[in-house]
Amino acid sequence: MRRFGLALLLLAITGPALAQLRVVSLAPSLSEIVVELDSADLLVGVLDAGERPAAIAQVASVGRYGQLDMERLLSLKPDLLLLWPGSVGPAQRDQLQRLGLPIFVAEPHSLEQLITQIKAIAAQLGRPSRGVVRASELRKQLTELRQRYRRDTPLKVFYQVWDKPLYTVGGGQIISDALEVCGARNVFADLSLPAPQVSIEAVLQRDPQVILAGDQAQLDAWKDWPRVAAVKQGKLLLVTDKGLERPSGQMLDATAKLCELIAPDR
């Protein structure tokens, strides 16, 4: 009888701990991190924005970027929300806080912060060892990139996000850190906004040695300004890998491609 009572006590203590978490990811990059941690089985809901990884193709949608379906989210009865602040509007972020649901907020401003947050997310998922292994792999890759592409005098780079109006990335945006890893410096690193609007005149004044954009027509437009160092040196470079826009583990691979694009001689 005593043994039976002890067994019931152990079941009461360990039962909830052994139950599988129900996780909702509120950003594509966070969904990607969960997949990279081999934990897609924990996801019961995701916020959509573009193509999903195959491993979560059938997971329920809780809305689209900036348009969270709160009723649908609550119906999934999540134990944990993974949140990128910019993916949900301020009013709905406040609503989520008031609901008292466990929330892990991730917004890395550097690749090192990204690696640390991936490790922390693994712990939140109850699978810390996977985070330790993944973080070690990524940190090794980051160290190798820094060593390979380091320059005493960084290249001045303008990273163009859009042309009409003209947008770039600020110094606190993780893409700025990726540029630094590649031995470059964002010419607008002094701006604090994640995606500041700038003028053509401001770009001309800062005279970048390299101009990066994701659209060839946007790059070709700079040929109207032949005195810009990047134009004179033929350094109008097309960024084809969209991985820089998704801060997950794959961003290290995307950064490696960026470094090779900027400095193929290294």
Image: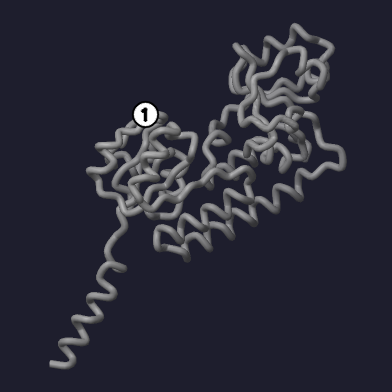
- Determine the image quadrant of residue 52: top left
Q: Nearer the viewer, residue 6 or 50?
A: 6
In the displayed image of the protein, which residue is found farthest to the front? 98
Q: The C terminus lies in which quarter of the figure?
A: top right
Left or right for 136, reference 192:
left
| Residue 6 visible in the displayed image | yes
- Residue at figure coordinates x 68%, y 26% from the top left: 159
Residue 9 left/right relative to 93: left
Name of the residue lying farthest toward the top: 224
Query: x, y (%) of residue 124?
Result: 43, 58
Q: Which residue is mark 1?
A: 67
In what quadrant of the picture does the N terminus appear? Answer: bottom left
Query: Circle 1 sits in a helix, a strand or a loop, which is it?
Result: strand
Give residue 59's position: percent from left, percent from top. 29, 42
Name the spot of residue 70 as percent of width and height, x first.
Answer: 30, 36
Q: Give the residue displayed 41% in from the left and 33% down from the top.
A: 91
Query: Is there any visible trace of residue 41 in the rendered image?
Result: no
Left or right of 61 on screen, residue 124: right
Q: Nearer the viewer, residue 119 or 155?
A: 119
Q: Is residue 123 above or below residue 197?
A: below
Residue 249 percent coordinates (x, y):
53, 47
Q: Amino acid at mark 1?
A: Gln
Question: Residue at 70% across / 52% down in the picture?
Answer: 144
- Scheme by which the image is coloured: one colour
